[in-house]
Amino acid sequence: MIRGRIVVIAQALSPIHHGGGTEGNVNQFRTHQVFHDGEKFPVPFISGNSIKGQSRRASAWFALAALGLDAEGGLSRKEVQLILSGGALTKSGASVRLDKAREAEALFPTLGLHGYSAGNSMQEAQLRVDFLELLCAETAHKYETEVNTYGTDDIRSASEKYASEHLEVYWGTRHEPTRRRSSRTLLTDHERQAVELEISDKKDAKNSDKGDSLQMMYEFECLAPGSFLIGGYTFAHGITAHELQAFRAGLHFASEGRGPNGGLIMRIGGKGSVDYGKCEMHFHGLLAEGIEPMRYIGTDELCPPMGEGDDYDSDLRSYIDYITENADATKAALEALA
């Protein structure tokens, strides 16, 4: 069994938003209270649940692609829920046979790695995920060892600034499509007449020439590009070699390539479809197998190659072969478990 911990240091390459309620018209960034110099301060963070969900989905999609199920489908709704979101407790009286559960976990390693619920049973995840917390003056004392060991001058400089200095308010606009004449042609006669009457009632001399361009503005709080966040993954009870490769496969599937400093480009938080949440992640692992001493594993060794023409290393290639060679048994095991 493989045990240990992987520290993650992420630098924002674009604004990052992670919703945490509203104040006035501003959608605020999610925060929690942290004591610093005897006082409480709100510190932005990305929830561990969000990071774990991303890992689960990416690792699962990689395995589904290896099985050919990403294109051909054929899974039940309960199987999809089990694979992509961890399932749910569905049976009040019947229990899941442990031998069937262990078989499914062995054949589809990401399942046991991230934990799941099936029947009346909940299986604990072997992967523990930290909050991805802003590295700032309020939190620097918590991560002194990590910053001293893996930090750069930019990281140390960012950790001296207060959390409020890392936050900016961004704004966007949302147009009402039926205000446009071309869009109104799609409406029924009754609804088109109602909309045109509404527009004429609200139009005044100032906007009488552009009544079809009315828009709504919205604001949201973001971590500014250049901010650093820190968190990690822990394999608390030990994981199998295949589960480690499932984790690595998820990193590969979720990434968008290499960043300017050699880390993986990934998306966190919300609004990723419009370029928010882009960050460069570096991984610093201390892992051991059995009772062997810990050894350092960095981003390049932990993550699959990303260069053009590069192939997977032998460990990840063996994992892919294992998945494909047991395709029929895996499909049957997932169906029986769900």
Image (cartoon, rainbow, N blue to C red):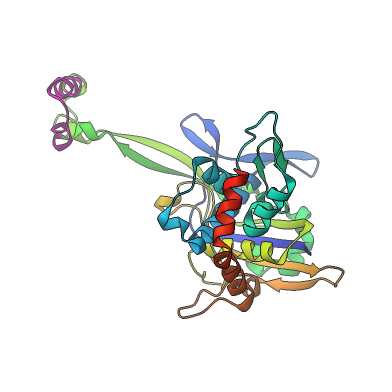
Residue at 74% of width from left, 46% of height from top?
98
Looking at the image, which is closer to me, 153 or 74? 74
- Quarter of the image for the C terminus: give it: top right
- Left or right: 337 in relation to 12: right
Above or below residue 77? Residue 74 is: below
Position of residue 307 measured from the top left corner of the image (x, y, whole percent): 49, 77
In the rendered image, which quarter is residue 252 located in?
Answer: bottom right
Q: Position of residue 92 (x, y in %)?
A: 68, 28
**Residue 113 seen in the figure:** no
Judge whether residue 212 is colored magenta: no
Dominant SS in magenta: helix
Q: What residue lies at 61% left-to-right and 73% top-to-bottom?
A: 318
On screen, residue 300 above or below 140: below
Please report the residue visible at 72 percent of the width from the left and 67 percent of the height from the top: 285
Q: Which segment is the magenta one? A: 181-199
Closer-to-camera residue (12/96): 96
- Residue occupying the far bottom of the picture: 309
Does the rendering let one see residue 53?
Answer: yes
Total marks in image = 0
Name the residue at 66% across, 41% down.
117
Question: 12 or 325: which is nearer to us?
Answer: 325
Q: Is residue 99 above or below residue 109?
A: above
Q: Position of residue 8 (x, y in %)?
A: 66, 61
- Between 188 and 80, the residue placed more toward the observer is 80
Q: Is residue 188 magenta?
A: yes
